[in-house]
Image: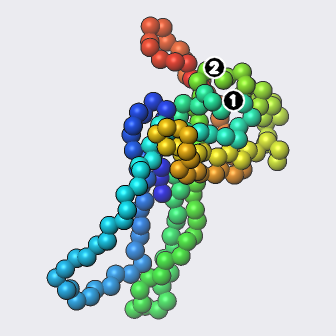
Amino acid sequence: MKFPKFSASEGKKALMCDFEWEGETCEFSKTSGKIAATQGKKHKAFNSAFFRFEGLPGECEWITDVEVPAITAKNAKERYGATRFEALHYANCDIGDLKITFSARSFDSHLSYVQKVIRDGKLTAEEYLDCELHMLDNSASKELGSIQFFGCGLKEMSMPKLEANKEETAKFT
């Protein structure tokens, strides 16, 4: 399962999620000649530009981008006998990295946490964070859904080099 990048600069881009499935078996049946499908009721599309992020030790108002980790399940195939079909079992689940980009305006509010974690070189139980990404409607007033992240630890902080005569705001990740 993969979510797109939540970006405040995306405008009215609809939120689309990617799912990949692996079938365990395939069943063949006699056709009736008709394909019947029921259509669900129409919902408002989630927008990737309207979000709110909470749970960080510094200011969260100046977050410009959030990249949600991709979740990948690894399947193990097991056979029971020489002529039987394979049975799928979950063997492992890989979760990518949560990446948050801030405007440089909130740099000072996050710097003390980063220095505290980097100073001793290890994360204690108190330094792990529980965060939440709220997906909002186009008026940014009503919450449509949320994603919760538990046990997040600082892995890296970077600040890109600023270039002269470039129309870009200062950011850090």
Q: Position of residue 166 (x, y in %)?
A: 44, 12
Residue on which the image places disc 1: 59
Rendered position, 98 above or below 90? above
In this view, the residue in front, 60 or 142, is 142
User: Mark 2 and mark 1: span between their CA atoms?
Assistant: 9 Å
Residue on which the image places disc 2: 105
Whether residues under marks 2 and 1 lie with C-beta atoms below 8 angstroms apart, the answer is yes
Amino acid type at circle 2 is Arg
Q: Position of residue 155 (x, y in %)?
A: 67, 39
Q: Is residue 25 visible?
A: yes
In this view, the residue in front, 37 or 161, is 37
Q: Position of residue 35 (x, y in %)?
A: 22, 76
Q: Is residue 6 visible?
A: no
In this view, the residue in front, 28 or 75, is 28
Side of 112 where 40 appears, left or right: left
Q: Position of residue 88 (x, y in %)?
A: 49, 77
Crowding at mark 1 (Cα within 10 Å: few <14, some 14-19, many 20+)? some
Residue ID at (44%, 82%): 86
Side of 161 where 106 appears, left or right: right
Q: How are the residues colored?
A: rainbow
Classify mark 1: helix, strand or loop.
loop
Residue ID at (65%, 50%): 149
Residue ID at (71%, 37%): 56
First reached walking from the N terminus: tag 2 or tag 1: 1
Amino acid type at circle 1 is Glu
**Quarter where residue 119 is shown:** top right
Residue ID at (60%, 27%): 62
